[in-house]
Image (cartoon, coloured by chain):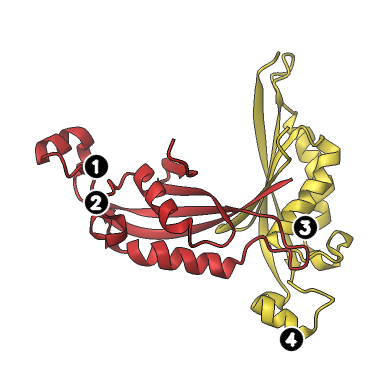
Amino acid sequence: MSPHASSTRRFGFSAGHRYWVEAWTPAENERVFGRLTVPHGHNYTLDVTVRGPIDPQTGMVIDLAELKRIVTETVVERFDHADLNADPLFRGRVPTTENVAVAVWELLAPKLGADRLARVRVWEDPTLYVDVRGEPQ
Amino acid sequence: MMLELTRVYHFSAGHRLANPALGLEANAALYGDCHRPHGHNYYLEVTVAGRPDPVTGMSVDLGRLDDAVRARVLAQVDHHTLEGVPALAGVITTGEGLARAFWRLLAPAVPGTLRRVTVVETAKNRFQYEGGEG
């Protein structure tokens, strides 16, 4: 059996969002979310980690150029300079850092394989990040 | 899927490595340069596990997390000498020792389930404690 390893590539996207639950009144949203109800944005950083056997021919877990193409097409082009609240992925789902990480996982898992996608880490800013992993096998 | 949220905090503190049971020369021999009083710009990473609430999308109330970390740790240690901090009495202030001590201070206080405490002493030294006394 080939030895396994993980490869991580970093991406960035700048996106706007606000915390807002449509089913609530404005007063209720402001009571729960405070200033986060005001539309604002972040320079998000995304670390995508793929785990698997090191291919004996190429010496790679994944061709990072392929990973870059998949993540760019699937996530970065969708979210960069976009209003997250307007994306159907966040219909009925507040675009918190947690939910952005979950959405990125849901976008990438079918493309990369849930068994190969080891971790999605979304940094909202340098002081806050959320990790999503698959359930342990 | 499993979800963990990590918040990164900062504090600056003075310390020295010394085992109070040992004398000056033995500590100097054991800890080398770290025996001398000095300080660091520390980073403290606090990781909590949880599922996003289906309505709010939040797995943890960040305000409550920040308040807990500020009250239990940052207010005690920032711009203090760690050896003089009552909450750290008896702790040898290595990165490992601090991570474990901060875990004990934070586990009962943070919202959600504390998963990991990471102390970054310098850009080269990083220490993690995940609980358990095994």
Vertical comparison of B40 with A2: above or below: below
- How dense is the environment of label 3, judged by Cα within 10 Å: few (below 14), some, or many (20 and up)? some
Mark yes or no: residue B78 visible.
no
Q: Are marks 3 and 2 on the same chain?
A: no
Q: CA distance from mark 1 to mark 4?
A: 54 Å
The answer to whether mark 1 and mark 4 are in CB contact below 8 A is no
Residue denoted by label 2: B38
- How dense is the environment of label 1, judged by Cα within 10 Å: few (below 14), some, or many (20 and up)? some
What's the amino acid at mark 2?
Answer: His
Where residue B10 sits, quadrant-wise, is: bottom left
Q: Which mark is residue A27?
A: 4
- How dense is the environment of label 4, judged by Cα within 10 Å: few (below 14), some, or many (20 and up)? few
Q: Are marks 1 and 4 on the same chain?
A: no
What's the amino acid at mark 1?
Answer: Cys
Q: CA distance from mark 2 to mark 1?
A: 8 Å
| Image coordinates for residue B30, horizontal then vertical, percent | 20, 33
Vertical comparison of B83 with A114: above or below: below
